[in-house]
Image: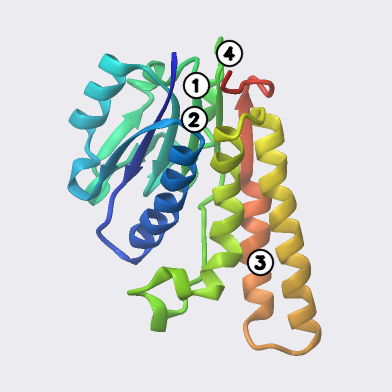
Amino acid sequence: MSELLLVTRPKYDDGTEYLAYYSSLIIKEAEKEGIQVKDFEGKEADKKNVINFIEKKNPKIIFINGHGDENSLCGHGDAIIFSLDNITLLKEKLVYARACSAGAILGANLAERNNGCFIGYKYPFQFWIDEKWSSKPSNDNAAKLYLEPSNEVISSIIKGKTAKESHERSKNMMMKNMKKVLKLGEKKEPGAMGMLQVLWNNFDGQVLHGNPLAKIE
């Protein structure tokens, strides 16, 4: 497999718009690292396009953004791209799915007899946004608390870290952010405990399946 990164970036609601923006930062990082990127943005993030590309180009790294559930990962408009019927396409690859719940069943099934890895979430992946910045996610400090640590997973992978190192670096960032929010709670900042609960949900829900030593060469 070549050092090629496939990214899905559906864009059709506030949640996917934010994920698409934060994924664009990863694309820039990958290009600086000399990694080729195939970006399926908006309506291009559909099953036909993504599956055809994997079958033809066999990318090493797969970065999936969007909605999902325990058994599937979706692209644009909630259309399923990956399910238990076709996850063998992801074997031997470094997969990070920033989507709800796919780490519970789909990711665990993928890990069987697989030298690659799957990093994702066994619970719904959640984040708060400040609606006044919904058209400009880069200015939304609330969303950064959740999305910068999630970016760290794939950022570390493209820099040559192992799956385990990437997973742990992300969780360490979440822990630091939880400590920041705890201080806000001590100052009686409105909403601090709710923010903390969401961060903990992501921290506790982020899982690594497969080979912890998987990495790009």
Disc 3 crowd, CA 10 A, few/some/many (<14, 14-19, 20+): few
Image coordinates of residue 2 in percent, x first then y, are 43, 17
**Label 2 vs label 3, nearer the camera:** 2
Residue beneath label 2, please? Answer: 95
Q: Earlier in the sequence, mark 1 or mark 4?
A: 1
Q: Viewer-nearest of labels 1 and 2?
A: 2
SS state under label 2: strand
Please say if 90 is above or below 96: above
**Seen in the image, is 123 located left or right of residue 7?**
right
Position in image of residue 161 (x %, y %): 66, 31
Expressed as whole percent of the image width and height from the top left, the position of residue 49 reads 20, 31
Relative placement, left or right, of 118 versus 65 is right
Q: Secondary structure at mark 1?
A: helix
Residue under pointer 1? 110
Write the residue at 57% across / 57% down: 148
Residue 115: which numbered mark, if any?
Answer: 4
Provide the residue designation for mark 3.
197
Q: The residue under label 2 is which amino acid type?
A: Val
Q: Amino acid at mark 4?
A: Asn
Give the distance between the C-alpha atoms of the residues marked 3 and 4, in whole angstroms: 34 Å
**Residue positioned 22% across, 22% down in the render:** 52
Say if mark 1 contacts mark 2, CB within 8 Å: yes
Q: CA distance from mark 1 to mark 4?
A: 10 Å
Distance from the alpha carbon under mark 2 to that under mark 4: 12 Å
